[in-house]
Image (spheres, rainbow, N blue to C red):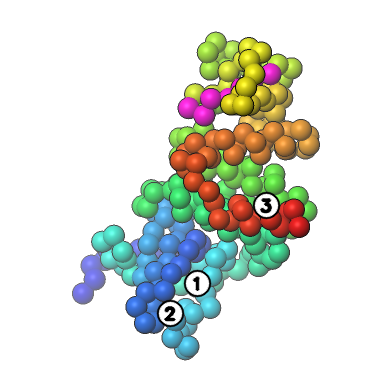
Amino acid sequence: MTSERSIVYQEEAFVLHGIPWKETSMIVEVLTAHHGRVPLVAKGVRRPRSALRGLLQPFQPLMINWFGQGELRTLRTAEWQGGIPLLQGHALFCGFYLNELLMLLLKRDDPHEALFLEYKQALKKLTHVELFEPVLRVFELALLRELGYAPSLEHEVVSGEPVDPHRTYRFDPENGAVQWNGSTGPDVVKFKGKTLLDMAKSNYDDPGTLAQGKQLMRILLSHQLGHQDLHSRRIIQELLLS
């Protein structure tokens, strides 16, 4: 018998990743609203007549129940909630990129309700925007902020003074913005103060902010990922260059 305390009812979730398990089942990693990233066994889901067979797909909102208290829990039911059109084309690969970031950076059973809402909002935006990069930049920064990895974009780290939009800064991934002292070299990457302030406000209307914002987020994410290459990012780059 399963105790009531080990059952989670009516939890909103998205599938991040799934792998086959045994002959007819799958292990799925789901992002949930109140429990964070949770690994679940979906028993028998690969059988042709399984009611769950077509439901456990990425980017579709689900309402799920599960039970178990160990590292790997068991999916009980899943219901499709609708409301988000299917991602297609470049948007689909952008969605996989978001999922890969969450799989690599978000620990299991670490709830972040605000991050769940940011993810849901990003998926909705990817279904209809023409320019995907601002959506990715906003989510990347929201992810790092939620996990406590994002230094301030609005204050200079040494003096504590507000970032001046007319000055130039370099960015220390561990600490934050440092006013540029004129030094040069392969490791010196400069950013406009305006770029940092625009990013803090999720404003990517300026093409310069969009270009420098991509560069800065690459530095911050690479620092947290240990310079690990992302499979989905390579695919997106290939598509944009084709």
Q: Position of residue 77 (x, y in %)?
A: 41, 74
Residue kind at label 1, given as amino acid type:
Leu
Q: Nearer the viewer, residue 70 or 6?
A: 70
The answer to whether residue 12 shows anywhere in this view is: no
How far, Cα to Cα, is label 3 from label 1? Answer: 27 Å
Q: Which residue is mark 3?
A: 237
- As for residue 109 lying within the magenta part, the answer is no
Mark 3 vs mark 1: in front: 3
Image quarter of the C terminus: bottom right
Q: Earlier in the sequence, mark 3 or mark 2?
A: 2
How far, Cα to Cα, is label 3 from label 2? Answer: 34 Å
The residue shown at (75%, 50%) is: 131
> For the residue carrying disc 1, how many other residues have a C-alpha within 10 Å: few (<14), some (14-19), or many (20+)?
many
Q: Nearer the viewer, residue 170 or 105?
A: 170
Q: Which residue is mark 1?
A: 56
Q: Quadrant of residue 217?
A: top right
Residue 45, disc: 2
Residue kind at label 3, given as amino acid type:
Gln
- Mark 2 secondary-structure assignment: loop
> For the residue carrying disc 2, how many other residues have a C-alpha within 10 Å: few (<14), some (14-19), or many (20+)?
many
Q: Quadrant of residue 220?
A: top right
The answer to whether residue 212 shows anywhere in this view is: yes
> For the residue carrying disc 3, how many other residues have a C-alpha within 10 Å: few (<14), some (14-19), or many (20+)?
few
Q: Which residues are magenta?
A: 168-174
Q: Earlier in the sequence, mark 3 or mark 1?
A: 1
Residue 168, disc: none
- Mark 1 secondary-structure assignment: loop
